[in-house]
Image (spheres, rainbow, N blue to C red):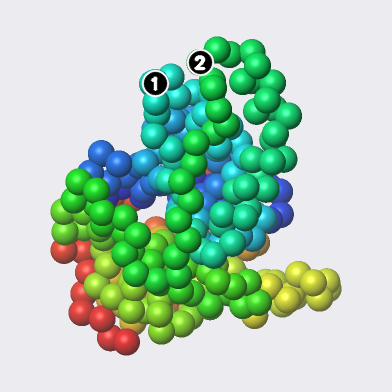
Amino acid sequence: MIEVTLLGTGSPIPDPDRAGPSTLVRAGGQMFLIDCGRGVLQRLAAVGAGAHQLSALLLTHLHSDHIADLGDVLITRWVSTFAPDAPPLPIIGPPGTAEVVDATLKAFGFDIGYRIAHHADLTGPPPVEVHEYTEGPVWEHDDVRIRVAPTDHRPVTPTIAFRIEHGGASVVAAGDTVPCPSLDALAAGAGALVHTVIRKDLIDLLAQQRIRDICDYHSSVQEAAATAARAGVGILILTHYVPAIAAGTEEQWRALAAAEFDRQIELGDDLHRVQVHPGMCVKPTG
């Protein structure tokens, strides 16, 4: 079984009730954080976990809302890991990730220096191990396998989606993207697809062109559901709601998805959990 927790279901627009985009996946005793939007560590604490327990940080792309708390994750893991000679945190993302991680550590350089000067057991900066990929296998440890494929969030490029597999169960985290064949292929036959969504019908009503611009590089609820249907996944898990789901309108969002996808549809607030078991898929139609 793989457990998916929507740690943060928000968007770039600050929301008092929704943290920034981030998803926690637990598989085979391992814990993967997918993206690290604002407030991610508070949400991680709410499920009884901490940065020091992460097996790896997986980044779908380098948009600010998806990496806003990268520094907090790196520093907090460093100062809350008390085992001697702790291994570095694996960070897996698209090309450009290493540059962003280096710049983040440089931005926290004064803080890192203060802590090394104050604590005898901190002898070096936060240990990290960055791996950049656009396609193929990226992780294989203790019966947990992860592979990635490119997605389409242009002009943001490159962007990737992750497929996590364990014990016959599988979960795909799409990140921000429009429908594309590479995501269809990665998600084919998966137990669940975690997909970011926007309501284009609502965004198109807004006066600001800069906000309406987001419609051309995100999937609508219907488009995400159609991707899930083509791939034959068992569960569609919606997240990163733009705009935020207004109280009492949850069934409207569900109905839009159900028009394209006739299996289990999950959406909700931060900390919503979904269990994904082996065999939760159908034959792909794409």
SS type, badge 1:
loop
135 w.r.t. 40: above or below = below
Quadrant in the picture for residue 244: bottom right
Which of these two is toward me, 135 or 160? 135
The amino acid pointed to by label 1 is Pro
Residue drawn at (68%, 25%) of the image: 113
Can you identify the residue that label 1 sits on?
A: 84
Is residue 124 visible in the rendered structure shown here? Answer: yes
Name the disc covering residue 121, or none: 2
Mark 2 vs 1, N-terminal side: 1
Give coordinates of residue 101: x percent, y percent: 60, 48
Name the disc covering residue 237, or none: none
Which of these two is toward me, 79 or 166? 79
Relative horizontal placement of residue 212, taking residue 130 as reference (left or right) = right
- Is mark 2 in CB contact (under 8 Å) with mark 1? yes
Residue drawn at (39%, 34%) of the image: 87
Residue drawn at (48%, 80%) of the image: 179
The amino acid pointed to by label 2 is Asp
